[in-house]
Image (cartoon, helix red, strand yellow):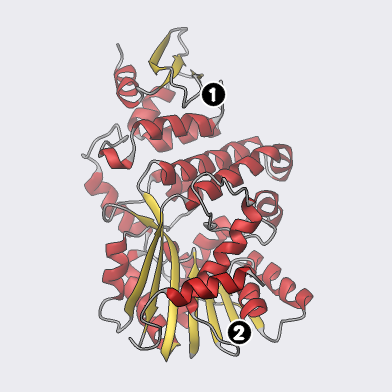
Amino acid sequence: MTVFERIVRRLVTRGQITFFTPDGRHFTVGRSDLAFSDLALRLHDGRVAFDIMRDPRLGMAEAWIDGRVSVEGGGIMELVSMIRANNPWESGRSIDAKGVLTRGFKAARQKLWQANHRARAKANVAHHYDLSGALYALFLDRDRQYSCAYWPDADDEAGIGLDQAQEDKKAHIAAKLHLTPGMKVLDIGCGWGGMALYLHRTCGVDVTGITLSEEQLKVARQRAEEAGVADHVRFELIDYRDMTGPFDRIVSVGMFEHVGTADYRVFFNQCHDLLTPDGVMLVHTIGRMGGPGVTDAFTQKYIFPGGYIPALSEMVAGSEGTRLMVTDVEVLRLHYALTIRQWYKRAMARRADIIALYDERFFRLWTFYLAGAATVFEHGGMVNYQVQYARDRRTLPITRDYMQQAEADLRGR
């Protein structure tokens, strides 16, 4: 039995995978389980097994992207889901075949990658968010919300669909901002402008959205012009560190992952200074359970260079000493898994269109990214955090009832 075979036998006990190696051998691991389809994995060259053992996620990703491995009986989502389901975060088992020997090196490398000065921050954003807008239009909801939606139940038994779940996410966040008409709001990392336009439309506030993506800026400004609200909803290409205030409220959705741990204190100090004395901020971010970690090599190399998912302890430590107080924390555990599975389903349905925009290799990369992202929220160590901050302890009501009432009102509009 080879080292590779021994490793995969430990990784998979529920569900069945048959491996076909380039030398004509095959072996089967696990047992059939009604929760999974039986799969076959064909390794098309002799280096695939070595690459996977060296770095499981990056090795498998690059073999998949290059077409050196193929899946039968299902797709990459089914394969990654089975492996992750066999090794859930709650079990305490790691799927890193390399063990702990390289963690010190990875931690040091992480610090270098996260050096997030202004020029690098803009380049990192461009790597992902300046991809063709046509790509995102193929798999996102109609408002292009590229972040976790808000679902009423773990299986979407209510059948609300992606578009409504994203509308409900915006209402959920708006309710926590405790808005009144005429307020000035800063949207840090505004994407294609959907949140800013929603807050103005539903709450009567003036919003300034900022981004480092030139492609997103063009779309956001065009949307504000077409809606006839460009005098109330403005978008700027500017680093948050260069903004001046004051603002009554700050909202940031899916941007904190790009700040970098070295700049957490800078971020929170700046937000404190941008807020009025009775200001409130809501940060929505992917979060890491179980304490600080490192960004895996696949994500760092291909998807979000310079990105890092924070532990809640790191967020709180970053804001301590800034005179911003944490006033509410919510953990969304499965919402992003539901969201990304919808994106994956839509991407698969538009396979030909995505390949026409880029090529087959890009499509394989993108679907591997989505499969890994969905399953890490289902079985891995990732969640979403919504953390509310205020400068004054008396600014907000002392119970959460106001959030529920405001959210109900917003959904009814």
Question: In the displayed structure, does residue 103 sit left or right of residue 11?
Answer: left
Question: Quadrant location of the C terminus?
Answer: bottom right
Q: Residues within 10 Å of mark 1 (few under 14, many from 20)?
A: some
Instruction: Give percent across and percent down for residue 262.
Output: 32, 68
Question: In the displayed structure, does residue 409 sit left or right of residue 331?
Answer: right
239 or 171: nearer the viewer:
171
- The residue sitting at 33% across, 26% down in the picture is 11
338 or 343: nearer the viewer:
338
Q: Is residue 67 visible to the viewer in this orientation of the structure?
A: yes
The answer to which quarter of the image holds residue 394 is bottom left
Q: Which residue is mark 2?
A: 205
Q: How far separated are the C-alphas under marks 1 and 2?
A: 50 Å
Q: Secondary structure at mark 2?
A: loop
Question: In the displayed structure, does residue 144 sit left or right of residue 48?
Answer: right
The amino acid marked with disc number 2 is: Val
The amino acid marked with disc number 1 is: Val
- The residue sitting at 59% across, 57% down in the picture is 165
Badge nearest the viewer, 1 or 2:
2
The answer to which quarter of the image holds residue 72 is top right
Question: Quadrant location of the N terminus?
Answer: top left
